[in-house]
Amino acid sequence: MKTQSRQRFASITGVALVGALALSACGSDNNAATTPAASNGAANAADCPTGTLNGEGSSAQKNAIEEAIRTFQEKCSGATVNYAATGSGAGIKQFIAGQVNFGGSDSALKTKVKDGKIEADDAAKACGSPAWNLPMVTGPVAFAYNLKGVDKLIITPEVAAKIFNGVITKWNDPAVVAINKGVALPDKAIKVFFRSDDSGTTDNFTKWLNAAAPAAWPAEPAKKWTGKGEGKPQNTGVATAVKDTDGGVTYTEWSFAKDNKLGIAQIDNGGGPVELSADSVGKSVTTAKQVGTGNDLSLKLDYATKEAGAYPVLLVTYEIVCSKAKDPSKVALTKAFLKHFSSAETQKSLEALGYAPLPGAVQTKVTAAIEALS
């Protein structure tokens, strides 16, 4: 979807997304009367179940899920899903509280005790069945900056950590200059912006800092920011703030950096500078290992990889669903949308928006998991 279309979607509160992800309806069921699904091309009743589902969570996947919904809705007008991009932390909380049918999160449900709770256990109790993490969107995290006259920038994990924890405060700091030979870096203050909401993007960005530069960033990765800077809500908030600030820098999902025409640094994990692209991100995702069991497809990404040409700062957005729907009438609708979202055609279309398609091996597992929903 072109930027103008995305902006039109973004103006709608509680975007009407079609068809889906309610996966196993562990949540509020605001079903509205619907008419039989309209047919566009080969669509039929089996492809286009009707109904209404509600979801909430990841803002990193907002542009992707809106595009997937738009194309699904072109053939299935009788299905509606409302999705609020409030951030991964909020999405998980609302899913566990039973307020939505599915949660979107840039981090899989935690399986270790945190704040006296285990997210995966709480989600299973809310569902009455195991909750599955289904990878759906690969969202590269950009080191995004606004620096007049600087069109190319290389950043290492150590330098990034020192910028975001307030140790490096000027763009012409010797550590930055040393890895950007020939670049005229100005004597300008660095203005850091971070996510003020609990964020899966923050969680993944700090996983990279901690894995690739543990001495410079010893803090435990988390959805809540522990570094320095000024907080702004969601990907839109930090990207807009950098756009409006000469000298500004943030971490944000690739599509938001592109939309705001921000500079995007090349990342050098030790194997040479890597430009952010669908191919370089896909190369990193192929090294991920499944840590979930069976059809729970939570992945462990290698943030410290030094493989040449692999972009290491990324996230995978999961649709968190109940494996067995409390309301069986939702199963067909859920499967139809998820099949559409994860299809090779839809995944390929997301590249223009700043996302990388799921690698073939992961996509195959997702398809099998969707089929297993009941």
Image (cartoon, rainbow, N blue to C red):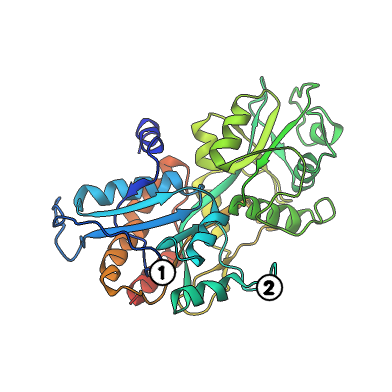
Could you classify mark 1 by the number of other residues whose Cα lies within 10 Å: few (under 14), some (14-19), or many (20 or more)? many
Mark 1 element type: loop
Please name whichever residue, 116 or 284, is drawn nearer the observer in this view of the structure: 116
- The image quarter containing residue 23 is bottom left
Up/down of 236 relative to 130, above or below: above
* Quarter that holds the C terminus: bottom left
Label count reads: 2
- The x and y percentages for residue 26 are 41, 69
Picture residue at 77% right of the left edge, 21% below the top: 186
- The x and y percentages for residue 45 are 15, 63
Would residue 86 be visible to someone looking at this image? yes
Labels 2 and 1: the sequence-earlier one: 1
Picture residue at 28% right of the left edge, 48% below the top: 71
Up/down of 10 relative to 97, above or below: above
Would residue 310 be visible to someone looking at this image? no
Q: CA distance from mark 2 to mark 1?
A: 22 Å
Q: Which mark is residue 137?
A: none
Classify residue 18 as left or right of residue 130: left
Residue type at mark 2? Val
Residue indicated by mark 1: 26
Q: Are marks 2 and 1 in contact (CB under 8 Å)?
A: no
Q: Which mark is residue 113?
A: 2
Of labels 2 and 1, the one closer to you: 1
- The image quarter containing residue 301 is bottom right
Residue type at mark 1? Cys
Please name whichever residue, 263 or 179, is drawn nearer the observer in this view of the structure: 263
Classify residue 178 as left or right of residue 2: right
Picture residue at 57% right of the left edge, 60% below the top: 107
